[in-house]
Image (spheres, coloured by chain):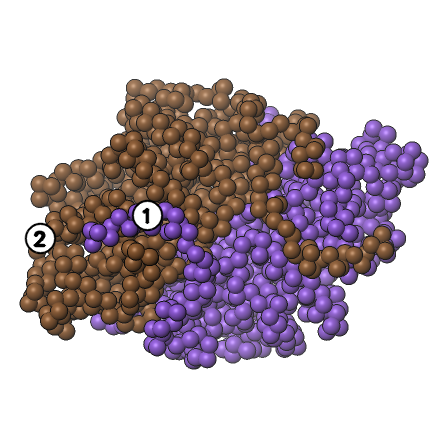
Chain colours: A purple, B brown
């Protein structure tokens, strides 16, 4: 091929040294990258396990993702099914436990490119909502993939507002069956993952009717496809909802039901059941189920959302020390783009955010674990706080991770737009997380409702949960910083965040109260305050994150070098938040204009300081090249060679160019006589 | 098919009435939508022409885009080539002129989905940079698509910094030829549209060497593929760079040259040429060429960038009055989501931004036209101002349009993530505009450099260009608003923007000066101020946009109803900018905390006011359903039916499910005995 004839002067991307521009960055690290990696992993043992899983995955051709960016939706789906089935075989082969650490590391190594992840949600919903008999019947089948299930809740017309779901399940005493129906188009199930082309079964949420009385939403286990030939069950219309912004490997689906009869035993009945005579019985508390949902949310943040931001930072920062562009100092060689202040200002705040969220997720795991212990002892007191906290934090974190990844993508210029950079993939996946598992604005307003209630409690002297005790603190009303160095003191900036969160909540709550007192109906008053309530909820969450980052740095006291760089990142995170929301702090004069100039100076100075450790800080995340799957982000930094080698593999370079044959050839041949 | 059996209760999406929830919004319009449309079009005659072009396109099956979201990269490319060739035939058939209004309307109707748009840039570069003989030789061939060209400037290693390009063109007196080479991998041309699989020719930018002396970057016309069989010319390696975040219909390509000889006549020589003896001659001023580049930029903003924001607003706003979710007032039917304040706060500012940019682009067109007249008379005085203005505005506008489209997408919840909504497509295209035609941060710093220079001139009492005369005005130092109604006075908010722009520039310039005076080298001082210089440049541009919007509303004095709603939008645009950047206005006390509360109250109140005209305001953009290509945004508002109908057409519902056959069937059949 002509393609290979001239390559004498290009070395291949395998067997080559690290790009010297990247190498140089690693030589000057102020801390041990390996040590930081083990801290991030939660111990050397975990690092070892994670790397062992990485090695297993990357040595197995079934898991190879090198053609991912060239695949059609159908090919992505097929490869993901193949991998998902193969993972199950591996787990069995290696003798790993279902809930062992290896499973999570699998997901990390494969960047989530596994089919039917909702099968796990299906299983968990049976475990949470099913009776012991139901669990005994269905879970072994699901465990062995003898059935694949989906979780069919969302409908075309309803996502957020579950009470509005329109699918019906009517119980008939005469047959001892439920009849499920999709009464109108907006009631069609829409979006469930794995529903489109895979699932044999579904947990379907429907309005329960017994003797013409509606008992609200309940879960039903329904077979939707034949296990013999995969054809839809009679009365079932099921299909794929088509292309999306990303997640091509998942077959999100639609489902319509017409007079589907299922036995009485298929209503998941841990918390409520219908007796043979049609009597509806509620039993126990479904708070445990509620808690499981919160844990799932926390899990998604740390295992799916955060890693994609960390990948984006790794790619963009490595690229930014390899890419040289323009003259910084006249006469010098072109500068690494990370040496430009504007590039630092783009990339280092998302990096600091990545670390902030890492430490936050460690905290949330501990909080959940504490909650779990209490709940097992029948104490559900932590639940409202945990719910409010995770709602708002989910919103903030997904928004910050998505925004950060997009900043990273754009900071790589044109090459960040190439799918081969891996960055478009990361952004479009993260963008989904702002909507799934609870739409962010709705979640922030749930947090706000909790905060307003707590604020009322504080005013009336009642006790409040630990995370909002700060609302009752008094402050001086003025920031106590006198020099720019003062803004590097955690007490100073934590206090500023606290003051701001309290003020925004107080203002929103006062406005709410004033509107009600002036005669507005409560729902109307609430609606007219929602923009400001969202601000207050965000400020609360940001305070929590800053405070937690400070505490985490504090705990690193036996790791002097690492503590030092983490302190810089914590400072940067906090000051970036102030710099990006100056008005919130200036509004009531808590921070003066002069103080804000000091904070800004400290912030900009930190950029230059952290820049020197930027590469070691992303190296510490320890993503393998295969997991990053980026032509720009590989450990060796040979970005141009890799872009070129990967591009050559694109199907557009292999396929016959029919467009030329059909449309252009006749035109071009007219020119032959003229040239 | 089972698929159609049950559809008795779903009407098809053709031949149906408008959704009553959408219909109701149109009945209460405060102004004539048709009148506003003609104003936006620049007169009734244009509206008529535009609609005629729409009709021609939408009645021709070649232009049909209904399968676009299901197509592979290759299919998108083929369809786009087919359309591009067909457009040319249509133009010929209808007897339209090359630069007539119809051509632009074609592009609008097809949402830019035409292949090789860079062929036009190729042509324009020959027209701008070629001699009369070169134009006479090449332009007729290009006009008739007997050759297709690309504009090969960007390389793997260089985009922004043109001086750094590494491709070489060496003149040999002995052969009277230039020899072009790609000396290293980073010198490979990368990104040019149409290069990957289409172009026969390219204008290639290379470092000119004559007798071992380098004369810098020059343009050369090179044939890269055979006109007989499309094979790469000897010594040429060319291909497609592979998948991208969007623009699948464009074959962006790579190109390596090894000892490609072209005749001396193929250097485009309007401004500089190499004589047969190797003498290098510069002639005339290339400022005209420079001006052409500015005009191209302005054109892209109004014809490619802005329409995609307007499409996103149309889709999201129509959907938001059809989608009902949750209870606003207890006991009432579920509310239209546009009735929630948070949804208004998401969608109405981008709508106001769309109008602001529309009026700005009218102004820029006029400014360019004025510039053109002056330049034709040999007066290039306006050029630096025009360059600075369009650089910064390009950055602001592309950023705002991309951000606005993404807000619209997310505001549609899960359905906004479906490709069938059309919204992912709009965002991913707009995201590219933040990088192409000048990376935004680089452009803002160019504007900043101009502003710093002008600020210096103001201080020393020298005259400055019209758009920066405001820098010399004096203000009271305090905002003169005493009630929230005062913030609806254009003088009040224009003055606030002016004050802010001046202050940010003054601060950045002072810091720059202080650093230099304290001994920092100038390049280093500049770098350390760039974050703040970017802020100053943005504030300048935002002032220009607000000021221009105010002027445009002023000029609508004979259109009372339209002027009224445009005034609301102008107020909203300005107050949203204040609300989103409160710190900039609070910093020096120009606006006090109390005043900011008033501004916020006015801002939130405006949301509720404009909400009532939201649908008429997007209807006025008059996008046909075919041009929007959105299941959520059609004029009739039957979103759920359309989503379902379109999803059924997805290839994932037509293709054999090999993943099931290969991987799942064996597993499922194990379950048969158990169930």
Q: Which residue lies at the image location 55% right of the left edge and 24% below the top edge?
A: B15
Describe residue A431's horizontal placement relative to residue A257 as left or right: left
Residue B500: give its label.
none
Q: CA distance from mark 2 to mark 1?
A: 40 Å
Quarter occupied by the C terminus of chain A: bottom left
Q: Note whether A321 is above or below B401 in the view shown.
A: below
Report the chain holding disc 2. Answer: B
Residue B61: give x, y in percent of width and height.
Answer: 44, 35
Describe residue B116's horizontal placement relative to residue A329 as left or right: right
Residue B580: give x, y in percent of width and height.
Answer: 43, 43
Q: Which residue lies at the image location 60% right of the left edge and 74% below the top edge?
A: A59
Q: Note whether A619 is above or below B415 in the view shown.
A: below
The reply to whether residue B92 is visible in this rendering is yes
Query: Where is mark 1, residue-wise?
Result: A666
Residue A144: give x, y in percent of width and height.
Answer: 77, 61
The reply to whether residue A600 is visible in this rendering is no
Query: Where is mark 2, residue-wise?
Result: B284
């Amino acid at each position: 091929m002509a393609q290979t004839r001239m390559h004498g002067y290009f070395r291949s991307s395998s067997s080559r040294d690290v790009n010297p521009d990247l190498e140089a960055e690693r030589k000057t690290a102020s801390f041990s990258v390996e040590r930081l990696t083990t801290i991030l992993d939660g111990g050397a043992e975990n690092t070892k396990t994670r790397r062992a899983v990485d090695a297993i995955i990357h040595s197995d051709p079934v898991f190879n993702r090198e053609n991912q960016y060239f695949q059609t939706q159908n090919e992505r789906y097929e490869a993901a099914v193949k991998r998902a089935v193969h993972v199950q075989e591996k787990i069995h082969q290696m003798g790993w436990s279902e809930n062992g650490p290896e499973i999570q590391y699998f997901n990390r190594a494969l960047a989530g490119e596994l089919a039917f992840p909702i099968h796990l949600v299906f299983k968990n919903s049976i475990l949470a909502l099913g009776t012991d008999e139901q669990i005994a019947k269905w879970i072994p089948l699901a465990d062995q993939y003898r059935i694949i299930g989906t979780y069919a809740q969302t409908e075309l017309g309803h996502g957020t507002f579950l009470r509005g779901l329109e699918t019906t399940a009517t119980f008939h005493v005469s047959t001892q069956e439920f009849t499920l129906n999709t009464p109108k188009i907006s009631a069609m199930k829409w979006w469930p993952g794995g529903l489109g082309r895979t699932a044999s079964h579904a947990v379907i949420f429907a309005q329960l009717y017994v003797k013409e009385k509606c008992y609200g939403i309940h879960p039903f286990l329904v077979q939707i496809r034949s296990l013999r030939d995969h054809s839809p069950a009679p009365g079932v219309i099921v299909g794929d909802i088509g292309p999306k912004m990303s997640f091509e490997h998942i077959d999100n689906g639609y489902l319509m039901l017409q007079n589907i009869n299922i036995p009485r035993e298929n209503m998941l009945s841990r918390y409520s059941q219908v007796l043979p005579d049609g009597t509806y019985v509620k039993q126990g508390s479904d708070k445990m189920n509620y808690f499981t949902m919160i844990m799932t949310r926390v899990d998604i943040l740390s295992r799916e959302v955060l890693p994609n931001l960390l990948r984006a930072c790794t790619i963009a920062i490595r690229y930014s020390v390899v890419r040289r562009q323009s003259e910084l100092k006249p006469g010098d060689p072109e500068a690494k783009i990370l040496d430009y202040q504007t590039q630092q200002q783009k990339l280092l705040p998302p990096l600091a955010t990545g670390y902030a969220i890492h430490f936050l997720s460690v905290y949330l795991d501990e909080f959940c674990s504490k909650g779990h212990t209490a709940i097992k002892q029948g104490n559900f007191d932590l639940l409202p706080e945990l719910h409010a906290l995770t709602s708002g934090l989910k919103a903030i974190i997904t928004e910050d991770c998505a925004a950060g990844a997009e900043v990273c993508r754009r900071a790589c210029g044109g090459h960040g737009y190439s799918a081969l950079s891996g960055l478009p993939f990361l952004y479009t996946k993260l963008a989904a997380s702002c909507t799934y598992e609870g739409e962010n604005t709705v979640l922030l307003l749930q947090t706000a409702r909790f905060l307003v209630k707590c604020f009322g409690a504080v005013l009336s002297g009642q006790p409040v949960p630990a995370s909002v005790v700060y609302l009752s603190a008094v402050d001086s009303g003025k920031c106590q910083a006198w020099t720019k160095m003062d803004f590097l003191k955690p007490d100073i900036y934590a206090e500023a965040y606290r003051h701001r969160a309290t003020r925004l909540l107080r203002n929103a709550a006062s406005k709410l109260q004033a509107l009600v007192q002036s005669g507005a109906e409560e729902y109307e008053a609430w609606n007219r305050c929602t923009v400001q309530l969202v601000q207050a909820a965000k400020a609360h969450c940001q305070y929590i994150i800053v405070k937690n980052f400070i505490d985490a740095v504090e705990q690193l006291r036996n790791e002097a070098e690492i503590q030092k760089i983490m302190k810089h990142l914590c400072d940067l995170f906090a000051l970036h938040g102030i710099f990006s929301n100056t008005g919130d702090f200036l509004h009531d004069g808590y921070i003066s204009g002069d103080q804000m100039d000091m904070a800004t100076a400290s912030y900009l100075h930190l950029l230059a300081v952290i820049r020197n450790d930027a590469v070691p800080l992303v190296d510490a995340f320890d993503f393998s090249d295969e997991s990053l799957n980026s032509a720009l982000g590989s450990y060796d930094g040979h970005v141009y060679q890799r872009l070129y080698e990967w591009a050559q593999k694109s199907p557009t370079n292999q396929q016959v160019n029919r467009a030329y044959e059909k449309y252009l050839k006749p035109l071009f041949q007219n020119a032959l006589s003229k040239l």
